Amino acid sequence: MYGFLIGVGVLLIFSIIWMVYRIQTLVSVVKGSDKKIASGSNRINAILFVVFLVGSGILMFWYSIKEFDNYHLPIASEHGVVTDNLFWITMAVTGIVFLITHVLLFIFPYKYQYSEKRKASFYPHNNKLEVIWTAVPGVVLAGLVISGWMAWSDITAPAPENANVVEIMGYQFAWEIRYPGKDKVLGDYDYRLITATNSHGIDFADKNSIDDFPSPVVVIPKGEPVLFKIRARDVLHSVFAPHMRLKMDAVPGMPTRFWFVPTKTTAEMREETGNPEFNYEIACTELCGRGHFSMRKVIEVVEPEAYQKWYAEQKSFIQVNPALASGLPSDTKELAEIQLTEK
Amino acid sequence: MSTASVANHDAAQEHEHHDNFVTKYIFSQDHKMIAKQYLVTGMFWALLGGFLSILFRLQLGFPEMDMSFLRPILGGWIDESGALDPTFYLALVTMHGTIMVFFVLTAGLSGTFSNFLIPLQIGARDMASGFMNMLSYWLFFLSGVIMFISLFLKTGPAAGGWVVYPPLSALEQAIPGSGLGMTLWLIAMTLFIASSLMGGINYITTVINLRTKGMSFSKLPLTIWAFFLTAVIGLLSFPVLFAAALLLVFDRSFGTSFYLSDIYIGGEALPNTGGSPVLYQHLFWFLGHPEVYIVLLPALGITSEVISTNSRKPIFGYKAMIISLLGITVLSFVVWAHHMFVSGLNPFLGSIFMFLTLIIAIPSAVKVFNYLTTLWRGNLIFTPAMLFSIGLVSFFISGGLTGIFLGNSAIDIQLHDTYFVVAHFHLVMGAASFFGMVAGIYHWFPKMFGRMMDAKLGYIHFWLTFVGVYLVFFPMHYIGIAGFPRRYYSWTNFEFANMYTDLNMFVSVAAIITFAAQFIFLFNFFYSMYRGRKATLNPWRSNTLEWTTPLHPGHGNWPGEIPTIYRWPYDYSKPGAEEDFIPQTVPLSATPESNLPHEQELVQAELDIMKEEEDVLVSNETIH
């Protein structure tokens, strides 16, 4: 069906082109316009530029205003407010330049279209003008750079000591989450220890790993700093949480990090967006293979009290699967056994 | 000097007698024929690259569509239910990018116009080394054959994105395209780099050494400046890509660990440790960013020439344009890491690259303002080439301004690898360079083939393409701001990205129409080649040197002595002059009515030199 339609469309286009082409060639020969420097088409093209300017301008403003709530994602992190501000300031500055230059670019063709009676101005250069329009963008850009740089320095500064640590590990094609447990310290890992039951490659010989626990969703407290420790197991991935304005590549062999402060709980966001199904999501933004488009993880932002409660209730890797503790050196094994008897 | 060129010319004439079909059309060493070979090959690749993009646009715009009708060409990549294979989707994206960036906009654009215009516009008989020039084309051709073959492999062509980041591109277990497909990609790119280097060395040498008498650097057309600097950028950056590719070959085939470390894949832990995937990104973007300017500068050069000629006005700020080009050339080497703000790069390095990146916006802005001022109070003739050049300026503005968002590392956190980036680079380097290339074809077609292309078809082609390109790429800004990631087979898995199905459908339809419009151009091109109206010697009434050659310039370009240059190429609408253009070959002493005061001062010196030349010539004749 599609094949047939496309075939007809192509045929139609070709016959139209052919007809238009023959007719206009004959007409221009009859009128002798092919001998002129600028034929009547010159005027039509000039007018079309103005039509394009007005038409596309209206379309752009109409769509940008109408769709604002759709393409503007609500912000849910402290630094997101800053970067979004920068985004909209840049939008205003570049928007003005965009409009002015385009109005000139499309009005000039209309205004200065060819006329045999007129001669163009011989105007090869003007140093003053050139210095001005080198300096002005320089100053404006300096302003944008400096504000961007200050925001960037804050965002990439080391995380506060008390940050809640979550480890996110990317692999083809999902994310796995690890929390540091009661001791708030993540245990060592080694990719050579990865097995079907120990997908993180956690080194349980390290005492810090005994209380580490997994979670199917990323649970984080509102209003407290959160530090994502990010790594990858096979190829590059990238953690992208659009509402948090957060993105950082996951690199095999080189752990990365990103810290931020969530500002709205999932429940609050559900209210704000009027969508009872709303969830914060993590997507992958570094091409990683066949399932790149399906690496989804949900983030649940909760009140700090609820977070503490949830945190205390989680079962560690060893509690979930006691077999992981087998073959450990005696002192760590004791710790593991204590853990197991607790529940 | 002049006698030497006469002697050269005689040699050229003699050479022409030996031309047969093979040496004239296939293994030609004539820069004009090589340029045409590049052009036609580039057009083939553009068509193929465009077609691949239509395939993945069908998937993105109509995800539910039954694509069984594509099975005759895609075979097993369409599954039983008529859906496109997600792995092959990635292969399509990868090959579209590789083909368009390297084969169309690098080889097709630089290869065509540097080859065609450098000797003609600087007044040379041919390139410095005709043989190396031929070799350059045939290496490119071979590279293309290998890349083309890779499309038909059972495991598919390379599929790791056109940047082919390891470990994805290094490990066959990660994606099937990283097997033989990636091997062929690397071989093809190696040959391509060799081809580019040979071409580049030739362009640089020719511009420096073979300029005709009087053609100082300050009298070069901006096209030549642009081609020259493009070749310099290519010569300095392509070897780094070669190094990156070579190390990747080592990692893939010889068990080294330049880019690989701590990898567990396919149920086993690999032995590689100590490598860094980020190292590859540094090496790749050290070429990858200058590559943007390799693609763009020739287009800007062509536009400068076309806009000035058809505005009947000198280009505004000739010197400022050259300084901008130089500025862009230098800065293009120190901004690469802005592609890596969120790659795990040291944030301090990120700050430095943000500063450097935003500085490069200044010369770009100067260029735009100068184009606008050139149009101002001109006497504008809208040839198809002129329309495409104005289109280029528009894309350059639209795409350039979004670069200011992406160059700002704080804003880039959100926008990186979303459709905002796709919109940005397709406008500023894709569409803009493509428009420069098309403008060049319309403008120099009469010189290439001695006939005119049909203007009206050109207008239709322009308006469909110009509006079409905006309809395709402008909506992508909205999709990008909404956070839609690139290289996604579908967005339905995510709540934040499950809307805009209508907008994606719209983009796909616009893309198909824009692609179809290119057939108008193809028809016009091939039909006019044989049946077009015969061109006059200087159809655009232009000043540059190529229009002083015969309608069909032979091997050696000028039948007699190469003309001497007396003035810059932009004396359009000079006050006092009768015509609205004065070719570069007209001496200042012949135009006392239009000379500016400082030029009038040069007249006497010019006359003296001419007299001296004549004496030398006469004495030479008597000696012989």
Image (spheres, coloured by chain):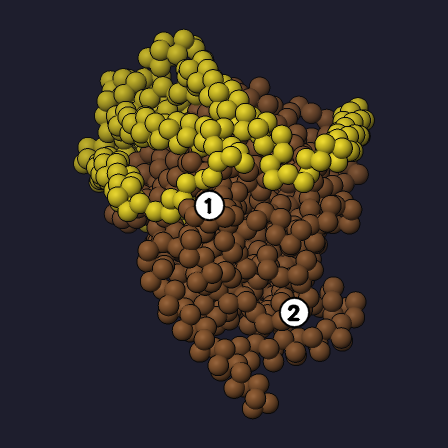
Chain colours: A yellow, B brown
Horizontal relation, residue B285 to residue B189: left or right: left
Name the element at disc 1. loop
Query: How many residues crowd around disc 1 within 10 Å: few (fewer than 14), some, or many (20 or more)?
Result: many
Q: Which residue is mark 2?
A: B559
Give the amino acid type for the residue marked by disc 1 in the picture.
Ser
Q: Residue B205: x, y in percent?
A: 49, 70
Farthest residue to the bottom: give it: B623
Which is nearer the eye, B318 or B21? Answer: B318
Q: Chain of mark 1?
A: B
Kindly indicate whether the residues beneath marks 1 and 2 are on one polypeptide chain. yes
Q: Residue at x 78, y 46 (%)?
A: B531
Q: Can I make out residue B31 in this image?
A: yes
Q: Residue at x 36, y 64 (%)?
A: B602
Q: Residue B539: x, y in percent?
A: 62, 48
**B166, above or below B129, in the image:** above
Q: Earlier in the sequence, mark 1 or mark 2?
A: 2
